Structures are given as C-alpha cells and as structure tokens.
Amino acid sequence: MKKFFTLLFASAMLPGLLWAQVTLQGKITDATTKQALSGAAVRLDDGQISLADADGIYKINNVKTGTHQISVSFVGYHGKKLTISLSNSQTFNIALEPSSLLADEVVVNATRASENSATTFKNVSKADIAKNNFGQDLPYLLDQTPSVVSFSDGGAGVGYTGLRIRGSDAARINVTINGIPYNDSESQGSFWVNLPDFATSVDNIQIQRGVGTSTNGAGAFGGSLNIQTGKLADAPYVELNNSGGSYQTLKNSLNIGTGLINGKFAFDGRLSRIVSDGYIDRASSDLKSFFASGAYYGNNSLLRVNVFSGTEKTYQAWNGVPEDKLKTDRRFNEFTYDNQTDNYQQDHYQLIYSKSFSDKISANAALHYTKGRGYYEEFKDKQGFAKYGLDTLFIGTDTIAKTDLIRRRWLSNKFYGATYAVRYQPDNKTDFTLGGAYNEYDGDHFGEIIWARYASQSGIRDKYYFDSAFKTDFNIYAKGSYRLNNISLFADMQYRHIFYQFSGYDRNLNNVAQDDELNFFNPKLGFTYFINPESNFYASYAVAHREPNRKDYTESSTNTRPKPERLDDIEIGYRIKKSWLSAGANIYLMNYKDQLVLTGQINDVGGYIRSNVKDSYRNGIELDATFGISPKLSWALTSTFSQNKVKNFVEFIDQYSGPDYDFVGQQKNEYTKTDIAFSPNYVGSSTIAYRPIKAFEVALLSKYVSKQYLDNTSNDNRKLDAFFVNNLRLNYNFALKGVKAIELGLLVNNIFNELYESNGYTFSSIYDGSISTSNYYFPQAETNFLVSLNLKF
C-alpha cells in the first residue's frame, strides 16, 4: 500500500512538475538601428546560455518557474542585467545600446574592399573557416572560393601546401595579417607550413582577385589574402579542439580567452600541435604553434599586442613523383635518408593601435617584428670537393675528389617595420584614407657540412657559403570614394619604393654582390552604380608592378637581370543580394607586360632564371552564387572560365653529346599564343549543404579543375590532367550542462577515390639529337577521412 500511495502521489504531482519548467525566448536587437544582433549571448542564473541566431533569436528551454536573473552581452554593446519573473513560457525581446569600444575591424579597414566597392572580392567568415578546419592548412580551407586551386607536397593537406588564384602562384599573391605583410621579402612567397593551425586564430579573411586595393607589402599580381585574427570575445571561454584520421594525422588545440575584464582588458591564447605521416611515403610533418593576444579597449581607442609563432619539421617531399612511378607507386618518395627534413621556426610580434578622434576621423598604426631561422638537411652522394671550396685529397697513391656528405642550408632573417592609415569620413558620401608602410628585411643564407665520408680540410660548423641580403620597402597610398546619387566614384593611388642589396657567395660559390633600386606608381580607378538597394554594377582599372625575386637577381648579372613586371587589370562586375540569394558575376582582363616566366635559357653567369615575356594575358568570367533553396537546404556555386596566354614564347633546351654528356649549347623553340603554365581554362566548385535539424548539417563539397600545362609550351606531354574531387562533411553541435557546445565533425575527402595530381614540374634535354622530357608530379591523397571533437566551455 505504501508503494501504491507513493506512486499515486508522484503521478498527481507529475503534471505540476512538467508545468514548472517553461521556455524563455526572444530577439536581441540594436537599440538604435533595430537590426538583429547575431551571436549575442543570453545567460540565465542557472548556468544555461543561448546565443542569438542569424535573426537575433535566442531560446532557453526547461527553465524553472519563478524569479530569475538574466544577463545579455554582445561585443561593441553595453551589457544588460535584468530580473524577470516566469510563471509560464514567455517571449522577452531585448535591445542593447552600442558602446564606445572601438571595434577590431578598424585595424584592417584601410586595406580592405568595402561591401559595395569596385573591387572583385570574397569574404570568408570565422564560421565558414571553422566548419572545414580539421587540421589541414589554410589553402585547403579556401579551396571552395572562386578561382582557387590548392595543392600539397605531401598529398594530404598538411605540411607544405599552397594555392593559386586565377593561375597566379604564391609569389604573386599578396598576404597580410592584420594589415602587416606576410610574404617573404626575397622569394615573395607565403609559406603556410610556418603557421600551423593558424586558421583557428583567424576571425575572417577577405580574398581580393586581380590587383585589388592598395595594400602593404609585395604587389598583388593575381590576388590578395587579407587576414584578420580573432576579435574581442563577448565572454570568457575555453575550447579544446581535437581531430585525427588517415595517415596518422592528429591535431590538438587549446584555446582560452578572458572576454572583457573591467570593461577594458581582454586576453586570448592558443596552443596547437599537428602531426601527420602524409600521403606520400615519409612525407611526415611535426608542427607546433601558439598565438597570444592582449588588448586594451579605451574610450574610442584600442591597443592590441599579438605574439604568435610556428615551428615545423617536415620530411622532404618537394621533388615530387616521377611520371613513370605514378601508375606503379604513386606514393613514391626518392629521398631515403632518415633526416631528410626541413626545419624552421618563425616568430611574429605585432603592436597595433587604433584611435577614433571623432565620428569623422579615425587612425591606426602598427609596429611589427618577425624573426625566422631554420635549415633543410639532405644527404648528397659523390659530391665534388670543388663545389664546397674544399681541396682534393691525396691518400697514398689514391686521389679523392668526391665524397658522400650531409649538408644543411640555413636561412636566418629579420623583418620589421611600421604601417599606418588615417581615415576621414566627413559625411555619408565621402570616404578618404591615407596610408602606407616602411619595412626592412635583413637575411643571411649559409651552408654547413655536418658529416662527410672524406672531410678534406673542412671543420665543424664551417660555412662553405655565406651571403647576406638587405631590402627596404616603402609605400604610401591615398584612396577615396564619393557617392553621387546612385554612383560611387573610387580612386586609389600608390607609390612604392624598393631598395635591394646583397653580398657574399651563394650556394654555387658565385659572388652575388648586387644592388637595385626601383620606383613604382600604381593607380586604380573605378565606380559602382547602385541599381537598387539589393544590386549594383561596378567597373575598375588598376595597375600593379612587381620586382624580380631573389633568384632572378643572384643567378644573373646586372647585364642580364630581368626587368620588373607590370599588370593592367580591368574588372567589370555585377552583385545582387536578396534574402534567398547572394550572387556575383565579373569579367576580368589582366594584361601583363614583361611577365617573368621560366624559359630554360642560360644567362651570362650560367643561371636558369625567369625571363621577361613581352606580352601575356589572363581573361575570364567568374560566377559566384549562394542559393537559399529552403530553410534547410543551400547551394553555393563558383565557376571560372578563362583564357591565359603568352603571345610569343621562346623555349630553350640544353643539348649534350658524347660519353661524358658534354654541354654543346641550347636548342631554341618558338611558340605563338600558348597557355600560361598552371592556368586551367575552367575551375568550378559546389557546396550543397542540408540541415535536417538545426544542430546537424551534411554537405557535399565538389571541385573540378580542367587540365593544366606544366610549362608554357601547351605540350600535351607535359600537363596535369583534369580532376573532379568530392568531399563529404558532417557537423553536429549540441550542448550539455556545464559545456557550452560540443561539436562533432567528419570530413571524408575524395569520396570517389579520384587519382589526381594538382601540381608538378617538367624539364627537358637533348642528347645526341634525341630529346628527353622528365615530368614530376605531386599526387594527392586517395579516399581519406578526418574526425573532430571540439569542446567549448
């Protein structure tokens, strides 16, 4: 009877218990503009948290009836604390007042294209990056954006990776981090292996295609990546991000932040490690990095210090796979020495200050310092002593002129300088910015023999070559826009001055002492015509110049030094944005004068350097659209149709003869209107995302790249075949008590097991009248997977 009455009592009380838990929901808006504040945080005194969605809607279930304290916060707004009494489910809307805290966006505004500017660009948000961030490098996370082709030496997207935009390689893509140049001053490339897991610390990226707006650092000759690191978090947080999968790939990352302390201070940090064996045999990576940031938010001012560093040890796979191995052993790596590795560390320091003087004038300035040092180690057999400045050995009756050895080739450098920008907006029609930068690079190149079968007269840590380089880069730009009814006019003028000097002896023991001084003027003009509030038409004309790189100088003389390149870029486009559609279409005409390409020609010092081709061009049409087919289904598409041509190309091939392969000269071949190397005529991507429930999304990511040639001869025997690759991505998010969010992810790459290569190189020679061509390729991974578990507190 006791159990019966207990059960009867519980049954009677059950409806009351159920009704004692209610739902609190509502909308968070800007008190002035009435716009929804997506991401605003609502916290209940029982520990439950809800973040407002894209429409500003928050919702908290299973709230006990009674009196509660709730707090609402959002970056850039004054927080609110409220007391409410709940007896049943309620809708409670909240409006927040903007605060005087200066937004982090002002740091990069000076070098970015605005929403309606006459520039072709794509913005990538933190959420977009996070969905795809399973530990692969940044180029792979940007692979679905227009005109981008990514590739990896190791084949799995970890380690040495790169991307091309409109066929232009890393040396022609300007990269800035918080407005500070990242490209290497000498090679002009960007090496993502030195920034492992940097994507986790990125808030957003703007990808400009073509010349784009004036920026700091090297001139953009195909595109720009303008990267902004993390902004102020609205609350303290701790995140543990973990992923792993095929080829023993594993990523671990710890992220912490304080949110705003006493309304003034904020600190954020990240510690990461990524390891992978790579798809190619022995193409392993061991990558470590950290990111630390501290900020002071004053009334209308912001002071931020960023310190970040990356260190990498990567087994070399940069020679690729010979063509004859692709069908029998596509994971082949010709290196077998157990420490055939690349080792490098790069430390970055940024001090950024921004100030809003009034509602019309604002400014920002930054000091930066980067220290890099490292080496690659390699085993070389049968090396002539003379190549290392060593004497021939005479032991008894034996003459020894060659030896097996292990060498290290070092790079140690410093890059430092300052950037600034002042913005003046007297009214809603006029926007003017004056900005610029001064940077210096100081770098040493040297080599050591750390082991030799026969050491000759070499000693421990002797340097068999040493040369140093010094480069200054100064630029100043002024840009402005003026709105006249439905037309916005745009002008951007930049002056850039470069001084480059180096001395000493290079790895071939040649004296490389030279200096050069260059001055460039880069004008840009354009307009945007606003058809209606949802769509606009734009057109622009821009000029860019670019200096030769280190090798172009060191392996030539002042008599054969190549000339700088010039690019004239015309962009014509249309943009439309509706609730269910965001789309753009543009035509580009990029005409090069004196573009630098490899021809195989030997110059007066015996070097194979890039040569200027008088006329070449890239013309194309780019399409980019995202359709909201339904609340649960979306489809993002990109397509680029292009022609990329060298009007007149001359190829030089070395000729040899006799049993000792004596060099006898070069054969000259002339071509007309050939394709520029690594420039596919079509690049397309598709992302179909389906969200059956709010917490779960499944997406199919597809990429098609048409054939590409390995050189500028349009020879079908020297090409990369077209490829069509599909990836499957699953993301599931939920929360538990005490855990803000639990994110589960699965990424299955190349689900149809496409065998393809996305990069390579070629060279030819002639022996006794018979031509021989060697093609090397970088195969990409077959079907593989990565899983992730991210915990947010």
Image: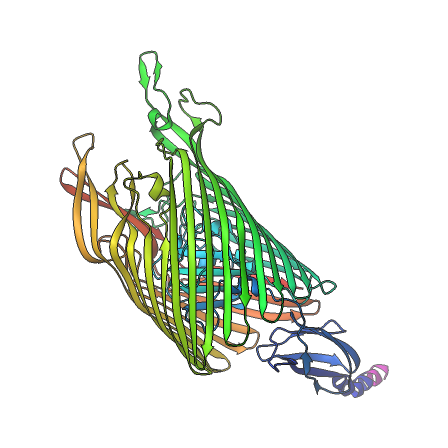
Residues shaded magenta: 1-6
Q: Residue furthest left?
A: 769
Q: Is residue 101 left or right of residue 180?
A: right
Q: Residue at x 40, y 29 (%)?
A: 405
Q: If the image is split into quadrants, where does the N terminus sit?
A: bottom right
Closer to us: 701 or 115: 115
Residue 465: x and y in percent read 41, 31
Q: Residue 534, relative to residue 614: is it above or below?
A: below
Q: Residue 456, relative to residue 152: is it above or below?
A: above
Closer to us: 42 or 382: 42
Residue 60: x and y in percent read 68, 78
Q: Residue at x 61, y 73 (%)?
A: 39
Q: How is the image coloured?
A: rainbow
Q: Is 101 inside the magenta-drawn segment?
A: no
Residue 452: x and y in percent read 42, 26
Which quadrant of the view contains residue 646? bottom left
Residue 569: x and y in percent read 34, 64
Q: Is 4 inside the magenta-drawn segment?
A: yes
Q: Is residue 766 left or right of residue 690?
A: left
